[in-house]
Image (cartoon, rainbow, N blue to C red):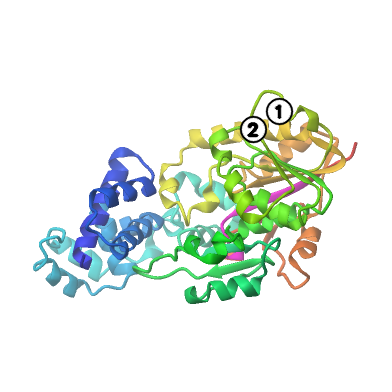
Amino acid sequence: MRLPGRLTAAIEVLADIEARKRPAADALRDWGLSHRFAGSGDRAAIGNLVYDALRKRASHAFIMGEDTPRALVLSVVASDWGEDIAALSAEFATDRFAPAALSEAELHALQSPERLDRAPDHVRAEIPEWLAASFATAFGPQWIAEGQGLAQRPPLDMRVNTIKSDIARVLKSLRRFDAEPGGLAPNAVRIAAGTRDARTPNVQTDEGYIKGWFEIQDQGSQIVSALVDAGPGQQVLDICAGGGGKTLAMAAAMTNKGQVFAYDADRARLAPIHDRLKRAGVRNVQVVNPDPGALDDLERRMDRVLVDAPCTGTGTWRRRPDAKWRLSQAQLQARVVEQTEVLKNAARFVRPGGELVYVTCSLLPEENGNRIANFVAQHPDFSPVRVVDRWAACLGADAPAPAWSDETSVTLTPATTATDGFYCAVLRRDA
């Protein structure tokens, strides 16, 4: 497919997402299944157009003066991909798969784009207007830059599985992808994000992945896993384990000694963990199915309880930009209720002197600091731990201090730590 045909496909996918209110990944998958003539390069380019349009939907709509799929895709190819619009317009006339010819208004908007410094703040931040106040509360004068950080393409991060391998071996296995040692996380390997129609490498076909030498895991997730500070011989409960990414990271840090109990209330979310544990060579994880009373024997016995709480996922908008525009105030309030309940439930498993670690992949204070303040007010036997002290101990003395911290919690962001957005707070049970 030539570029005009790819633009038409991206417009169709965006229209499907809008009409059916469905995730972008599902719409792209279905488009590929119904257009089997499209090669892997075509599908990658179309996916990049769709995701780039959604990441910066607000500013592209501002530039074009409308929020239609066609307007967004045209703005992406001009503003982000750097295509010559006059040449592209001429190509439209000779390609039967191209979108309709550009109008005079579209040509003017693309060749003389509206200056974004004149746009409203939430447009410059690339976030829904109703979230501007929350971002301003979280980040003060830097909130626009933080929003813009969430609108960039993410790299591909991996965590070296130290049970089976080391960074040197993994880098050698992935050298054809130009992999490099990661940033903050001590066992991270990173492949930089591509531009335009670049394909994300399928590292899951690599020998190292098949042998369990590494796992795909954003560095932010790796960092908060390290901040749990799970050590050999400890008893650890991952009470919202999901697919098991943080469970695997903690098990490796514990060198297969002690016990990690991996639990999730959703049996389907927990299912992938079994194959991942086997591939990684992990032997100190016990998967606990969500049956009635399944965790009763663990009450007040755990050295660490990790609560990777259900949240809005605002910190992952680089990877799931469609979720940014679907999020509603009602959904945020529902997550807050769930977070309050899961914290209350998790507390009963922490032994005296043990720690409760609260993590979200959200950047909203409603889900983060507010939830911790609420919990501490209702549980006077828990007190905050200085996470900033643990930061250097877990990540190394040379690790730059977190930009966003109140000493008892840290917030990771694409703009400051080059990771997905995460919040982490640690509470110790005094009695």
Q: Is residue 93 left or right of residue 112?
A: left
Which SS class for mark 2? loop
In the picture, the disc for residue 345 is: none
Residue 67 visible in the current orientation: no
Corner quadrant of residue 26: top left
Amino acid type at mark 2: Asn
Image quadrant holding the N terminus, namely: bottom left
Q: Is residue 289 left or right of residue 58?
A: right
In depth, the one of 14 and 291 nearer the eye is 291
- Percent position (x, y) of residue 39? 27, 62
Q: Which residues are magenta?
A: 417-426
Mark 2 neighbour density, 10 Å: few (under 14) some (14–19) many (20 or more): some
In the picture, the disc for residue 294 is: 1
Which numbered disc, 2 or 1, marks the residue that appears first in the sequence?
2
Q: Is residue 422 magenta?
A: yes
Amino acid type at mark 1: Ala
Toward the top, the furthest residue is: 292
Q: Is residue 38 left or right of residue 326?
A: left
Mark 1 neighbour density, 10 Å: few (under 14) some (14–19) many (20 or more): few
Residue on which disc 2 sits: 289
- Percent position (x, y) of residue 126? 43, 56
- Percent position (x, y) of residue 407? 77, 56
Confirm or deny contact between disc 2 and disc 1 (CB under 8 A): yes
In depth, the one of 292 and 82 nearer the eye is 292
